[in-house]
Every structure is written in C-alpha cells, then in structure tokens.
Image (cartoon, rainbow, N blue to C red):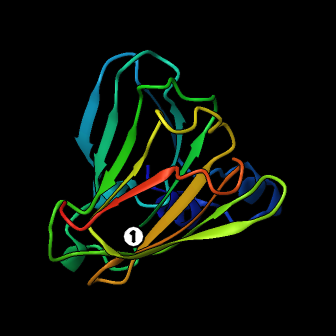
Amino acid sequence: MSYLSQINSSSGSLGDFNAIRRPTEAITNASAVTRTLHDEESGTLFYLDLSAVDNDITLTLPAAANAKGVFYDFTYIANSDDDADFVLTTGDNDVDMYGYMVTGAANSTVDDVDGLSKITIDGSVSQATEGLRMNVVCDGTNWHLSGYVPVAIATVVVVESASA
C-alpha cells in the first residue's frame, strides 16, 4: 500500500495517524543489484548496505516526464566495501540531476551536482559512508538532489557523469 493510500485510509484519529510509517526497503549488495525504480515507490526510504565485497548497486530513476512530484530517500546503514559503488542514474542523457552533497567531518564543504545524468558514490575512495543520506525529487523535467556524507573534507566521494 502506498504512503498516500495509508494516509487516505486512516480513520483520522491521532492514534491511527501515529501508526503510519513511510515505506522502507533494504537493499544490500550481497549480489550486484541493477533495477529501475517505479513511481509507485515514491516516498520510499531505501536503506543501503554496500558492505559486501565488489558488488555494486545501480538504481535508475523513472522517466522524469511522468514522475513530477516523485521522491526517494537513500541512506547508508553500514560502511561500504572498498570496491562497492552506489550508482544513481536518470537513465537518459537529456534528463539531469541538480543539487548538492554536503561533506561533513571537521569542516563542511559542498559538492555541487549541476546538470548530471549519473552520480556514483565511489566505495574505492571512501569506505566511511555509514550515515550518508540522499534525497531526490522530480519536477517533471529533471531530478533535484540534496544529501550529506560524513567523510573528511576534500574526499571526492561523488563521481559525476553527464552520461546516464
């Protein structure tokens, strides 16, 4: 049942409303994962565990033209293996992501994501990814990204690509 369906089916009492939780899904890299997300999964919080050796997780966002208002959240629940990458792609070179990733640690810096069709959280650069979070939302033309990664400044965690 979708998040909105749960809200609409609620009896309206505060007790029922407090029991409603947004959809969640755990994704691990016990084996390589390649999949396309669907509009019906909008609002889902994906828990990512890339601690297994050498297997990547690649998620393709739905076609932007049909996804206005669709959003997803991603969070790492474990540090990644040094050869395990998380790839998020629009699947279309003409559809881009715009936004930023704040890098934490002692002093914050901002990694600007400007007109890119694919980003990769590179496990070979920094395995200290537990606590990383990202949010993407679609405006019907492009996807907008915001996020945080708790690694030392000047560590390039997000690898950017204009090609989906």
Residue 136 rendering spot, x and y as whole percentages: 46, 66
Q: Position of residue 134 (x, y in %)?
A: 55, 58
Left or right of residue 14: residue 115: left
**Residue in view at x 59 percent, y 62 percent:** 147
Whether residue 25 is situated above or below residue 92 in the rendered picture: above
Left of 26 or right of it: where is 140?
left
68 to the left or right of 27: left
Which quadrant, please, contains the C terminus?
Answer: bottom left
Name the quadrant containing residue 56.
top left
Vertical placement of residue 57 versus 63, above or below = above
x, y percentage for residue 100?
54, 72
Q: Position of residue 137 (x, y in %)?
A: 44, 72
Compared with residue 134, is residue 31 higher up or lower down, i.e. above or below? above
Q: Which secondary structure lies at badge 1?
A: loop
Q: Which residue is mark 1?
A: 70
| Front-most of residues 84 and 106 | 106
Judge by depth and name the residue closer to the eye, 120 or 25: 120
The residue drawn where x is 24% and y is 62% is 62
Q: In the displayed structure, does residue 22 sit left or right of residue 151? A: left
Q: Nearer the viewer, residue 137 or 122?
A: 122
